[in-house]
């Protein structure tokens, strides 16, 4: 369990090791507060969708999963992507309703990027890795929350660096996204240092 | 075969279950509750949970000015919320100063109704309402400026103060610019505009300053100056302005949906010298203010500095020249920035802010003791603000209306 959690947060960090969810990563990292809000939203969405998708996968979609219904020979794993995306979309909409109701300031700040989590590759990637690595539902909970935390840490740290760099004297061509890409690359190099941490 | 069937059933069930869960969540989180809204000390009225305050007020016939249509970018729909402070949203932080936020100011378009709310508005805004007016006359003043004379209900006209504006709504339309009637003398200017088309499928609303003199208002006439909003020269494929195109197309007798009067651009009380600077259709509110003040027998010096590009773009010049001859305390100055060589023009040339600097501010004993009223294109306003700043005029003495561009 600890290995899965550490791997999810550090060595297999979705943003900095796999470069998933980079569009939101770059777009919503101007301020720490919004980045942290989006990070929390991703943790929740990830923490809910990965276990739900794990249950759906192991009891409905995986080869032989339907043997409880007397249909052991059926393999529905090709429906994986469409089902996972449906679950993610519903969860994100729920998230949006909750934020609009209870944290309207964050809801406005995240703007269009909140519904865009639906097609955030980090979220779908989380669910697909879970299938690929054959996690059981309990491990899926840990992996889901852990990968969410990893992505949140990455975007918050990135936003903090960008806030500092805003007043830095950078060459004109590197201001904005140019510098952001370089910073992402350096952070990714840093995260690769965690490589030997998890056996 | 069974596999396919099971797959289809499974997928449909999942989607239905997810939709049902979402619908239930929505019902719990966005309840359809009545919410009481209190304006000033009037009796509260009811609105629904989740509507924005701007819409709720509009449904109750309280029309706040909102040039951006509720997107949170124009910063005009300001209200003061009484009682419990509400955390400002990012759009409000961008539009309201810290002092305003501390005083409880909010943008009505950003405030969503979740609990009963009490707000304070200037009483004058409560009078603003939707009304229909009739187009009595229209004429071309310059190739791209049309003057409309509208007949409005007497109770609306009674609320109009010089400097106010009204919002006009154009219904959905689709016509070619070749159907617009243009006087013979402007035919050459219009030759290349004939290919344009104005198309909109939804009603569109825009604000126009009222240029009525007290004499116009006495006849219940709202005079508006409409400049045709053309696509910028570097992006000729953009469509022309929806409402201005339509207002160039409408014929006498047309009913036009409007709301107002709105706005807080006003002549300040007192006897400080007044300096008015305008360009293009920015003349509209300034004309109303000048006529109102001179009509009331104001005795302080009043000067009107008007910038146009060339002789053809200059209008109402004779009216102001006559006013200057009649009232010794009124001065009218024109600067043409780009006169044509073949036009007879012996007046001032160059930009109006330069004229203001060289012929008024430079030798003025106390530029900071005057009130400045600006209305015109954004670039002109910025240039004039720069000149005034150099002359040591504090921003609190400068009033501007940035619609008239």
Image (cartoon, coloured by chain):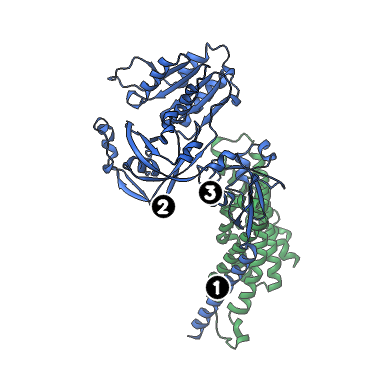
Q: Disc 3 or disc 1, which is closer to the eye?
A: 3
Q: Answer yes or no: do the residues labelled 3 and 1 have beta carbons within 8 Å?
A: no
Please state the chain letter of the residue tagged with numbered disc 1 in the rendered image: B
User: Which image quadrant: the N terminus of chain A?
Assistant: bottom right
Observer able to see residue B226? yes
Which residue matches tag 2? B202
x then y, percent, for residue B197:
32, 45
Q: Which chain is blue?
A: B
Of callouts 1 and 2, which one flags the residue occurring earlier in the amino acid sequence? 1
Q: Quadrant of residue B282?
A: top left
> Chain A is shown in which shade?
green
Badge 1 crowding class, 10 Å Cα cut-off, few under 14, some 14 to 19, many 20 or more, is some
In the depicted structure, whether residue A14 falls above or below residue B198: below
* Label drawn at residue B15: 1
Of callouts 3 and 2, which one flags the residue occurring earlier in the amino acid sequence? 3
Per the model, the C-alpha gap separating discs 3 and 1 is 42 Å
In the picture provided, is A150 more to the left or to the right than B234? Answer: right
In the picture provided, is A85 more to the left or to the right than A151? Answer: left
* Label drawn at residue B61: 3
Badge 3 crowding class, 10 Å Cα cut-off, few under 14, some 14 to 19, many 20 or more, is some
User: Which image quadrant: the C terminus of chain A?
Assistant: bottom right
Per the model, the C-alpha gap separating discs 1 and 2 is 34 Å
Observer able to see residue B337? no
**B259 or A37, which lies in front?**
B259
């Amino acid at each position: 369990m600890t290995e899965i959690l550490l791997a999810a947060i550090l060595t297999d960090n979705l943003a900095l090791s796999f470069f998933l969810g980079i569009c939101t990563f770059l777009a919503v990292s101007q301020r720490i507060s919004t980045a942290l809000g989006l990070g929390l939203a991703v943790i929740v969405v990830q923490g809910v969708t990965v276990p739900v998708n794990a249950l759906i996968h192991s009891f409905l979609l995986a080869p032989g999963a339907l043997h409880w219904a007397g249909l052991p020979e059926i393999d529905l794993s090709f429906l994986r992507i469409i089902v996972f995306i449906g679950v993610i979309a519903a969860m994100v909409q729920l998230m949006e309703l909750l934020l609009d109701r209870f944290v309207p300031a964050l809801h406005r700040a995240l703007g269009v990027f909140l519904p865009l989590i639906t097609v955030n590759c980090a979220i779908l990637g989380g669910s697909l890795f879970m299938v690929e690595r054959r996690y059981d539902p309990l491990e899926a909970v840990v992996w889901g929350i852990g990968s969410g935390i990893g992505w949140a840490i990455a975007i918050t740290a990135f936003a903090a660096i960008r806030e500092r760099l805003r007043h830095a004297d950078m060459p004109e061509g590197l201001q904005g996204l140019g510098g952001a890409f370089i910073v992402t690359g350096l952070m990714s190099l840093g995260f690769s240092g965690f490589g030997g941490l998890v056996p | 075969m069974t596999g396919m069937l099971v797959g289809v059933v499974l997928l449909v069930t999942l989607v239905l279950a997810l939709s049902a869960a979402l619908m239930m969540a929505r019902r719990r989180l966005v309840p359809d509750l009545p919410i009481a809204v209190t304006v000033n000390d009037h009796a509260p009225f009811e609105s629904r949970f989740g509507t924005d305050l701007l819409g709720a007020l509009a449904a109750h016939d309280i029309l706040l000015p909102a040039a951006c249509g509720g997107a949170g970018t124009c910063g005009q729909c300001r209200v003061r919320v009484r009682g419990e402070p509400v955390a400002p949203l990012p759009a409000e932080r961008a539009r309201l100063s810290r002092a305003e936020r501390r005083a409880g100011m909010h943008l009505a378009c950003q405030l969503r109704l979740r609990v009963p709310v009490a707000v304070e508005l200037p009483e004058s805004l409560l009078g603003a309402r939707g009304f229909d007016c009739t187009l009595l006359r229209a004429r071309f003043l310059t190739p791209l400026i049309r003057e409309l004379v509208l007949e409005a209900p007497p109770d609306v006209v009674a609320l109009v103060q010089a400097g106010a504006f009204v919002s006009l709504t154009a219904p959905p339309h689709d016509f070619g610019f070749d159907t617009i009637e243009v006087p013979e003398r402007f035919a050459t200017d219009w030759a290349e505009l004939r290919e344009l088309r104005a198309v909109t499928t939804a009603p569109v609303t825009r604000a126009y300053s009222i240029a009525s003199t007290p004499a116009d208002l006495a006849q219940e006439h709202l005079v508006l100056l409409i400049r045709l909003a053309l696509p910028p020269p570097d992006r000729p494929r953009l469509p022309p302005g929806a409402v201005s195109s339509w207002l160039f197309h409408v014929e006498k007798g047309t009913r036009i949906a409007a709301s107002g009067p709105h706005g807080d651009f006003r002549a300040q009380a007192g006897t400080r010298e007044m300096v008015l600077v305008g360009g293009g259709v920015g003349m509209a509110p300034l004309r109303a203010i000048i006529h109102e003040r001179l009509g009331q027998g104001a005795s302080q010096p009043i000067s009107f500095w008007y910038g146009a590009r060339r002789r053809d773009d200059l209008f109402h010049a004779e009216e102001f020249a006559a006013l200057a001859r009649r009232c010794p305390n009124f001065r009218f100055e024109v600067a043409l920035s780009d006169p044509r060589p073949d036009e007879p023009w012996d007046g001032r040339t160059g930009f109006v802010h330069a004229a203001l600097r060289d012929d008024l501010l430079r030798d003025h004993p106390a530029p900071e003791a005057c009130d400045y009223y600006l209305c015109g294109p954004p670039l002109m306003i910025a240039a004039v603000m720069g000149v005034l700043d150099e002359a040591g005029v504090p921003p609190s003495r400068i009033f501007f209306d940035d619609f008239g561009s």
